[in-house]
Amino acid sequence: MPKAKNAKNGTGSARRKNMSTKNYTSAKPLASTSIITCPDCMHHAIETMPQDACVYLYECKNCQKLITPQQGDCCVFCSHANQPCPTSQRDKKAYAEMTHLCEEVADSISASAL
């Protein structure tokens, strides 16, 4: 028995099919190391960031000052390092992917309204 086909193009809406099969995840891996800089003595240290937690306190290896995040940041890497923590990296990617997907859905809706 033959399968039923969509009257438009025989396979279903191409736009819908493209949206469901696109891969929105980036091939770029999350950074696992970062160079943290002490705000007091400007000492730089390369540190490995935990993949599943934020570091709230960090002791400078040069002046032994206890470093904390700036207001609004989740950890010392987001405030005082050259790379944000993996948690923030994941959140940023998820936000970018969702924004792109939402724009595509909005375009699809406005195109179907015409």
Image (tube, rainbow, N blue to C red):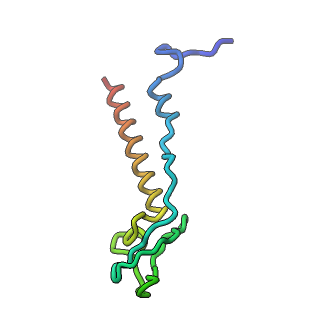
Q: For the point 42% across and 64% down, which residue is it?
A: 84
Viewer-side residue, 39 vs 51: 39
User: Horizontal and vertical percent for residue 14?
Assistant: 47, 24
Viewer-side residue, 63 vs 50: 63
| Picture quadrant of residue 77 | bottom left
Q: For the point 35% across and 36% down, which residue is it?
A: 106
Q: For the point 53% across and 15% down, which residue is it?
A: 10
Q: For the point 44% across and 61% down, which residue is it?
A: 88
| Picture quadrant of residue 43 | bottom left
User: Horizontal and vertical percent for residue 42?
Assistant: 35, 78
Q: Is residue 107 above or below residue 90?
A: above
Image quadrant in which the C terminus is located: top left
Image quadrant in which the N terminus is located: top right
* Residue furthest out toward the bottom: 64
Viewer-side residue, 78 vs 105: 78
Viewer-side residue, 53 vs 27: 27
User: Horizontal and vertical percent for residue 103?
Assistant: 35, 39
Q: Is residue 100 left or right of residue 23?
A: left
Q: Is residue 95 above or below residue 51?
A: above
Q: Is residue 107 above or below residue 83?
A: above
* Residue furthest out toward the left: 114
User: Horizontal and vertical percent for residue 34?
Assistant: 46, 67
Q: Is residue 51 above or below residue 38?
A: above
* Residue furthest out toward the right: 1
Total numbered circles: 0
